[in-house]
């Protein structure tokens, strides 16, 4: 809200949307803003901005920029990093599988998670991000995938074992009951 | 005979067997020597004077009494065990999950070990140099701030004009206005890639190669997530 107060007061004339507050209280008509709202735009339940790239400084500064953008648009966004993935790329010599050159690539990833984004605002946000995309960064707008969320955490082996044990016990109980 | 039976036998039984064989030979010898003598008595010393024949089964342990399996008790036991397991699962699940370390924040494992060796002292700056730097930073900050304000202005103008457009649309047709408020299902997922320094080479044939995923696999993970190769086509 702070941006709006700073700039709107200077650059914009009050539109018909703002309540008309007159100095003469005896003959003024004041309707509080929450009364005549009318139909509101639908909201996207979950929107993720996933930024990936092999060039880390570029990606890092862009992710900071995107996080600030969400504040300007007055959307609550949670920015978090995703563990780095690395790969060894070998280019073969012609007509053989001997490696001529070897490279080590690291894929860095950052995500900004947003919820309840208005359908009117979301396309604007996407446009701004598209226009300010730097070199070497790939941005994907999508909903959260459980597989990607699981990748962020260290898997709990004891929990997995216990769950398997419960399954086997359930099976034996079923066997007994069927007899 | 006893040779063909695969039974675990004790030493006493083995001695009895040996005695049996020896006595069989003695019997043959005795038969050979007797010459139609009616007064000779046929006797056998196989198995000793008591003629006690012990088989492996007799020498074995007496059979145990068969216990009756109470299925109800077993069922209750299993149910109890399941409840206990579920309780411990709940406890583990309530614990906060541990996040994987991110290399660029926590430091690459191989570098962290040699960090002390890589330490360098900060250079001592002259007064002029530090002054120059401060002035430069201030100029840069002012420039970036004005850039930021311009951008905020542009964004808010866009939002405002969109809101005004919606108001005008409402005046024209209520149905179109309500449709405009709805979610666009085709909006996401959407991928964009940043510009590249050089355009793609026409008719370029990439050399053959191999991509090996070398991401660190933690204990519970079996396979890697596929390594995406960002294409700039």
Image (cartoon, grey):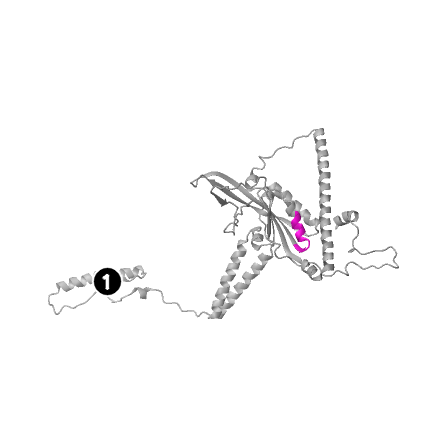
Quarter holding residue A30: bottom right
* Residue under the point 74% across and 48% down: A3
**Image quarter hosting the N terminus of chain B:** bottom left
Q: Secondary structure at mark 1?
A: helix
* Residue under the point 64% across and 43% down: A61
Q: Is residue A24 magenta?
A: no
Q: Where does label 1 land, which residue? A: B20
Q: Position of residue B169 (x, y in %)?
A: 72, 57
Q: Is residue A120 magenta?
A: yes
Residue B117 against residue A19 in the figure, above or below? above
- Choose between B172 and A23: the one closer to the eye: B172
Residue B42 against residue A42 in the figure, above or below? below
- Choose between A62 and B22: the one closer to the eye: A62
**What is the span of residues highlighted in magenta in the rendered image?**
A115-128
* Residue under the point 54% across and 42% down: A105
* Residue under the point 63% across and 54% down: A47
């Amino acid at each position: 809200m702070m941006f709006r107060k700073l700039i709107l007061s200077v650059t914009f004339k009050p539109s018909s949307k703002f309540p008309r507050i007159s100095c003469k209280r005896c003959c003024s008509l004041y309707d509080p803003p929450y009364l005549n709202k009318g139909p509101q735009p639908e909201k996207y339940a979950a929107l993720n901005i996933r930024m990936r790239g092999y060039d880390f400084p570029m990606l890092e500064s862009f992710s900071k920029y995107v996080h600030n953008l969400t504040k300007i648009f007055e959307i609550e966004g949670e920015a978090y990093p995703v563990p780095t993935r690395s790969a060894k790329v070998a280019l073969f010599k012609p007509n053989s599988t001997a490696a001529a050159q070897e490279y080590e690539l690291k894929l860095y990833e950052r995500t900004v998670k947003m919820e309840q984004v208005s359908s009117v605002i979301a396309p604007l946000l996407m446009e701004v991000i598209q226009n300010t995309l730097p070199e070497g960064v790939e941005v994907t707008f999508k909903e959260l995938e459980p597989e990607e969320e699981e990748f962020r955490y260290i898997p709990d082996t004891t929990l997995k074992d216990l769950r398997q044990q419960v399954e086997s016990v359930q099976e034996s109980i079923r066997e007994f009951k069927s007899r | 005979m006893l040779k063909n039976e695969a039974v675990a036998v004790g030493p006493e039984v083995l001695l009895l067997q040996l005695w049996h064989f020896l006595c069989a030979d003695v019997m043959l010898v005795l038969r050979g020597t007797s010459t139609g003598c009616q007064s000779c008595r046929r006797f056998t010393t196989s198995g000793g004077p008591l003629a006690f024949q012990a088989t492996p089964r007799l020498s074995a342990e007496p059979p145990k009494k068969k216990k009756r399996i109470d299925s109800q008790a077993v069922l209750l036991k299993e149910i109890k065990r399941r409840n206990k397991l579920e309780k411990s699962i709940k406890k583990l699940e309530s614990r906060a999950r541990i996040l994987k370390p991110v290399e660029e924040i926590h430091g690459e494992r191989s570098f962290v070990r040699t960090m002390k060796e890589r330490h360098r002292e900060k250079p001592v700056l002259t007064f002029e140099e530090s002054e120059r730097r401060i002035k430069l930073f201030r100029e840069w900050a002012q420039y970036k701030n004005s850039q930021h304000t311009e951008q905020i202005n542009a964004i808010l103008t866009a939002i405002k004009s969109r809101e005004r457009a919606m108001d005008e649309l409402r005046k024209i047709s209520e149905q179109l206005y309500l449709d405009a408020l709805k979610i666009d299902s085709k909006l996401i997922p959407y991928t964009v890639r940043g510009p590249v320094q050089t355009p793609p080479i026409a008719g370029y044939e990439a050399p053959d190669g191999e991509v090996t995923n070398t991401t660190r696999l933690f204990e519970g993970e079996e396979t890697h997530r596929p390594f995406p190769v960002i294409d700039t086509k």
